[in-house]
Amino acid sequence: MENNKSYDLIVIGSGPAGEKAAVKAAYFGKKVAMIEKSPNAGGAGVQTGTLPSKALKETALYFSRVYEKQIFEQSDKRLTKTKHKQFTYRRDIARIDMQEEVENNFLRHKVDVYRGFGSFIDKHQILIKGDEETIISGKNIL
């Protein structure tokens, strides 16, 4: 078990709030650790929530031609010819791009990222259960 690196701030979860807190603290010279249980950064908003659902919605609107002005009666069968793969392609591209942006933000600001499930040992120590168990300590924990 790797034991007890010390940080000014430990953030649990790399969603929008966690990412912003970690990066802002690191920007101001604090030593920061990020704990993320998922193999991918960005939290639910990037992986399964807001971003993917909006990408799917915009893809549906594109294929339905809802925003196009149809002055002449044109029978474009764009929506009926679409495949599931076309919908998921845009969703996956948007998700992967944002995930990479979050991960690059951590690298750029030198935030240490731990993959695993974080749980409190006491008010300043976190046990991270991932590929291996690690204990880290922090002055502040978010």
Image (tube, rainbow, N blue to C red):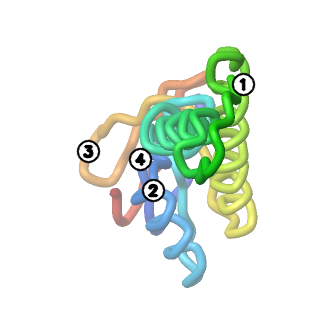
Left or right: 71, with 126 as reference point:
right
Q: Which mark is residue 122?
A: 3
Closer to viewer: mark 1 or mark 3: 1
> Is there any visible trace of residue 10 in the rendered image?
yes
Marks 1 and 3: CB-CB under 8 Å?
no
Q: Secondary structure at mark 1?
A: helix
Q: Which residue is mark 4?
A: 12
Q: Which mark is residue 16?
A: 2
Residue 91, percent from left and from top:
63, 34
Q: Taking 30 as reference, is 99 above or below it?
A: above
Q: Taking 139 as reference, is 43 above or below it?
A: above
Marks 1 and 4: CB-CB under 8 Å?
no
Closer to viewer: mark 3 or mark 4: 4
**Residue closest to the eye, 79 or 89:** 79
Q: Residue furthest left?
A: 123
On the image, which quarter does residue 108 sit in? bottom right
Q: Residue furthest bottom?
A: 28
Q: Earlier in the sequence, mark 1 or mark 4?
A: 4
Q: Residues within 10 Å of mark 4 (few under 14, many from 20)?
A: many
Q: Taking 61 as reference, is 71 above or below it?
A: below
Q: Earlier in the sequence, mark 3 or mark 4?
A: 4
Q: Taking 84 as reference, is 14 above or below it?
A: below
Closer to viewer: mark 1 or mark 4: 1
Could you give the CA–CA distance between mark 1 and mark 4, rounded to whole angstroms?
A: 35 Å
Q: Which residue is mark 1?
A: 86
Q: Residue at x 53, y 26 (%)?
A: 133
Q: Quadrant of the C terminus?
A: bottom left
